[in-house]
Image (tube, grey):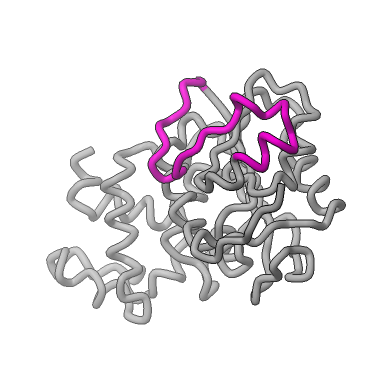
Amino acid sequence: MQYTHKKSLGQHFLHDESICKEIVASLHPNTKHLIEIGPGAGALTKYLIQHAWDDFYCIELDREKVLYLEQTIPSLKGKIRELDFLEAPKPSWHNFSVIGNFPYNISSQIVFKLLEWRGAVDEVVGMFQKEVAVRIASKEGNKDYGILSVLTQCYFELEYLMDVPPHCFTPAPKVMSGVIRMRRREQPLFDGDYNAFRKFIKVCFNQRRKTLRNGLKSFLPADQLTDSIFDKRAEQLSVSDFIALYNTRWPAGKKS
């Protein structure tokens, strides 16, 4: 059975077998429950099914790819859920891991969705457009550091694993790709109201070229903005700096 590459779904299929094996080997050896997002033509899937997971299934939106996978890897029948991951319900498992060559057009949204499930996600090994992978793993003082960096690092230990060049895919994307691994922290750096904290971080980065004093003056009274930390721009603050500011100055944080 033949299949097509759908640009509208951000499909770039990995065909470098050594990289496929390396990505699969990056999963923690004690992984029990695993979801693969966007298996496509099965580049990772054919290696994943060789492991004795307690439970495993794929989420694939493209009907053509579902039929292709079921035909080429018969053991996948009953283990593919044909739906949009962004609309997928949280798995019933207490804890689980996630792997995938994520569709580049929704990769940031995938991470935000996984953050909503943060208490149950043990690990994420994902392929991203390199720009997005670097953004997630960046530390303060870097122009790539932003909302996604702060939020993921509150709950996960981040590791940038490898670059993956365009020629490793069909069709070849116009950008470099990167693989990162996110492993849940035993104790999150922030344990308050996630949605309120996310709004706070978004406000801080909304005008990232301005100092925090200028960026937050519409939200906080002037006498709350006198500390020297407000002379800095958002990208200069560490994750712990943001948490301290939220807990001491931001109204929702002070109430929690």
In depth, the one of 233 and 148 nearer the eye is 148
Image position of 193 (left or right of 170)? left
Determine if the magenta segment contains residue 103.
no
Residue found farthest to the right: 18
Tell me what residue is drawn at x 59 percent, y 35 percent.
58
Using the rendered image of the protein, determine whether residue 17 is visible from the camera's viewpoint: yes
Residue found farthest to the front: 1
Instruction: Give the quadrant of residue 123.
Output: top right
Q: Quadrant of the C terminus?
A: top left
Tell me what residue is drawn at x 54 percent, y 42 percent.
60
Residue 53 % position (x, y): 70, 23
Using the rendered image of the protein, determine whether residue 139 is visible from the camera's viewpoint: no
Tell me what residue is drawn at x 71 percent, y 44 percent.
42
What is the count of numbered marks? 0
Stretch in magenta = 67-94
Residue 112 % position (x, y): 43, 49
Residue 150 % position (x, y): 46, 56
Image position of 54 (left or right of 80)? right
